[in-house]
Image (spheres, helix red, strand yellow):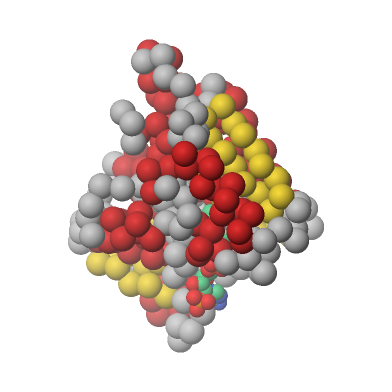
Amino acid sequence: MILDGKLVSNKIKEELKDYIQENNLEYGIAVIQVGDDPASNVYIKNKKKVAEYLNVNFNHFKFDLDITDDIVIRKIESLNKDKKINGIIVQLPLPDHLNVDKIINAIDETKDIDGLTIKNCGNLFSNNPGIISCTPYGIIKLLEYYNINLEGKNAVIVGRSKLVGKPLIELLLRKNATVTVCHSKTKHLKDYTKKADLLICAVGCKHLITKNMVKRGSIIVDVGINKVDNKLYGDVDFKHVSKKAKYITPVPGGVGPMTVALLYYNLIKKES
Ligand code: NDP
């Protein structure tokens, strides 16, 4: 069965739109971009489309590639004070000469709708209220929508990034799953993935996960986005793995749309 991120994200967006209209609310977000990375341009376009659907005021600030940390941080500080701005996003990746941690942590934690500041990451791991990173949160919402119970399940995450893998550890533990994390230094990856009742792959390597690496009847969540010859592929060989899995997310149409929907869920939920 397909875990349809497009369908579930549309439902979330509809609910948010109704909530905004019924309560006559006004929201504004700011997106900071440095340079002109084509993938970032596409992600920003997708976020803007949803903002327009929800009637959220979308402010895009695009800086030249050679900008300094100080200028970006000063912009963030002025947006932190701006009462019309409720959410601030720094579009990643930033060019290498910029200090990503310093820039992200300049965002006021209450406006950090990506959930990436140290404060929000700390809140997550301390079980305090806060904003949860959109991709991991979107994955949990997708599994919840399909009533998939994770208690006692063997969950294997491939990828340990701050953005995806690490927050997932905590979110899956909250669901009482037993969590294993694999990464580039893991030896014999298949030994782990084969035992997974739930396999979440967030690496960025086309078809890293093949049919012989998964357990029959398992749940497969593919976070990877790999563009090859202008076509999108996941980290999972969907065509063959889907024959063995009980549930699987497609790429595109799985985790991607959930991520964008959860960004706006984070914007609106914190004030509801
Ligand atoms: P990172 O590059 O930050 O992390 C990749 C992780 O994969 C690292 O932990 C790395 O290990 C691990 N890894 C690399 N090679 C292997 C391997 N051969 N076997 C096992 N593990 C490996 O990426 P992100 O977490 O930011 O993103 C991962 C993928 O998900 C990308 O394709 C990205 O585009 C996509 N993505 C999709 C989103 C969506 O909305 N659908 C949102 C965010 C990301 P190590 O730590 O040892 O280096």
- Quarter of image, res 60: top right
Toward the viewer: 28 or 212?
Answer: 28
Q: Identify the image quadrant of the N terminus.
A: top left
Toward the viewer: 232 or 100?
Answer: 100
Percent position of residue 81, x then y: 47, 39
Q: Residue at x 62, y 34 (%)?
A: 59
* Residue 262 visible in the current orientation: no
Percent position of residue 116, x then y: 44, 55
Q: Identify the image quadrant of the C terminus.
A: top left
Q: Residue at x 36, y 15 (%)?
A: 23
Say if 15 sits above or below 91 in the image. Answer: above
In the displayed image of the protein, which residue is found farthest to the right? 229
Say if 214 sits above or below 259 in the image. Answer: below
Say if 94 sits above or below 52 in the image. Answer: below
- Quarter of image, res 57: top right
Percent position of residue 239, x then y: 59, 55
